[in-house]
């Protein structure tokens, strides 16, 4: 089975190459170019393609892949909101993903963002390096005995809930399907979570229902001085509403690993370029906003699990076995 891997970085190649000898029958061609309308025809002659969170798998690209005879799309990630599932299914394509490769990796990064933006460790590091040992601008707040509100208690939300409990926080959660095994978590309505939480962490998937779940109205319902962290998907937050909320001093801190505008820039070094849109710069201009570039997943353990599950998915398809990680309509 020949698979074309789009948008690969050296770390992708390294982790997949390491495991490849254990998966006989699979050949991989790694290319740096990501998939879009112009690069989709490169899939001709391959049995499958492999893509990531920042890939464009919209209608036109799926049409191109269909023309190339592609029947299998391997997502080396959990999310699939960037895939036009209806068109893919219409052409009998199978979409396989990696549902949970290391929830702790993402949850730990969410807490890293909370701690960084709360205690300003990123600024303290630079100040100390410049012999500036003054503390002005570095004041934070305790997390101990504060309330954390977790929106979405799936694999990552649960891990975040446990981390917050470890910090001595009370943990509230909102999820359409409460998880009864989380006995230390109190499930409440979204409104109650918004009104009662000192820290709000987003862990639900991006769907039509959750798009802009954080908007003008939901921000107005939050406590003043709330900490917000998003490691899920950028479009859960309506960016303009967030910017207005920050300007109105609603937030103590905001930590973003994902943002609405990220797709064109994510994983690219844009340091020499002038960005065509200003939203990211506007967010970065606020002293209480900390941003990272969709790196929640980026640990050795997670990359190993991603490579293993993706290769298992490909092998299951190749051998006509049950596709347990298939994304259905
Ligand atoms: P999951 O599927 O295990 O959990 C999602 C939870 O959200 C479920 O409990 C579900 O019931 C809940 N949910 C769905 N719709 C909801 C709604 N309308 N309101 C409230 N809750 C709702 O997913 P997992 O593995 O925990 O991942 C969560 C998200 O994290 C993914 O969808 C993805 O967008 C993001 N992610 C980010 C990464 C990063 O590197 N920053 C890496 C991996 C995932």
Image (cartoon, helix red, strand yellow):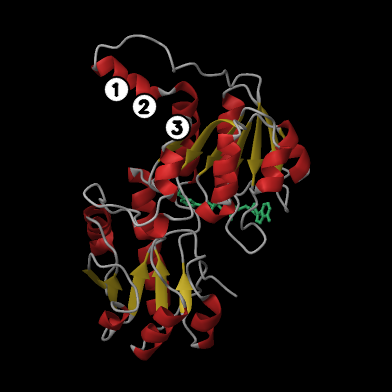
Q: Residues within 10 Å of mark 3 (few under 14, many from 20)?
A: some
In the picture of the structure, the residue carrying the numbered disc 2 is 122
Marks 2 and 1: CB-CB under 8 Å?
yes
Which mark lies nearer to you, 3 or 2? 2
Q: Does dot 2 land on a helix, a strand or a loop?
A: helix
Q: Position of residue 253 (x, y in %)?
A: 53, 31
Whether residue 186 appears in this view of the structure is no
Image quadrant for the N terminus? bottom left
Image quadrant for the C terminus? bottom right
Q: Does dot 1 land on a helix, a strand or a loop?
A: helix
Image quadrant in which you'd find residue 19: bottom left
In the picture of the structure, the residue carrying the numbered disc 3 is 112
Q: CA distance from mark 3 to mark 2?
A: 11 Å
Q: Position of residue 88 (x, y in %)?
A: 49, 81
Marks 3 and 1: CB-CB under 8 Å?
no
Number of the label disc, if any, that sits on residue 111: none
Camera-nearest residue between 40 and 102: 40
Number of the label disc, if any, that sits on residue 126: 1
Q: Residues within 10 Å of mark 1 (few under 14, many from 20)?
A: few
Q: Residue at x 68, y 32 (%)?
A: 197
Q: CA distance from mark 2 to mark 1?
A: 7 Å
Q: Residue at x 27, y 56 (%)?
A: 12
């Amino acid at each position: 089975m020949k698979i074309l891997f789009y948008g690969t970085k050296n770390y992708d190649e390294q982790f997949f190459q390491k495991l490849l000898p254990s998966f006989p029958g699979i050949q991989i061609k790694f290319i740096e170019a990501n998939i879009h309308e112009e690069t989709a025809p490169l899939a001709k002659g391959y049995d499958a393609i492999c893509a990531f969170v920042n890939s464009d798998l919209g209608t036109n690209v799926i049409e191109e892949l269909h023309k190339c005879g592609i029947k299998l799309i391997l997502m080396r990630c959990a999310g699939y909101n960037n895939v036009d599932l209806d068109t893919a299914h219409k052409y009998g394509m199978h979409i396989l993903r990696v549902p949970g490769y290391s929830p702790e990796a993402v949850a730990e990064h969410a807490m890293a963002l909370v701690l960084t933006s709360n205690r300003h460790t990123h600024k303290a590091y630079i100040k100390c390096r410049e012999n500036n040992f003054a503390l002005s601008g570095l004041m934070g707040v305790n997390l101990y005995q504060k309330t954390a509100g977790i929106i979405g208690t799936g694999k990552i939300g649960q891990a975040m809930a446990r981390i917050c409990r470890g910090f001595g926080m009370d943990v509230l959660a909102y999820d359409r399907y409460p998880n009864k095994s989380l006995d230390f978590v109190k499930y409440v309505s979204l409104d109650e979570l918004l009104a009662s939480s000192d820290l709000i962490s987003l862990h639900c998937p991006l769907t039509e229902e959750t798009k802009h779940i954080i908007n003008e109205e939901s921000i107005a319902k939050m406590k003043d001085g709330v900490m917000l962290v998003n490691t899920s998907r950028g479009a859960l937050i309506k960016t303009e509403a967030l910017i207005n909320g920050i300007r109105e001093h609603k937030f103590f801190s905001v930590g973003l690993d994902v943002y609405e505008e990220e797709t064109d820039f994510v994983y690219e070094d844009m340091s020499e370029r002038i960005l065509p849109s200003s939203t990211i710069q506007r967010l970065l201009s606020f002293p209480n906003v900390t941003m990272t570039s969709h790196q929640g997943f980026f640990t050795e353990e997670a990359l190993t699990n991603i490579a293993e599950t993706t290769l298992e998915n490909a092998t299951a398809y190749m051998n006509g076995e049950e596709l347990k990680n298939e994304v259905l309509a």
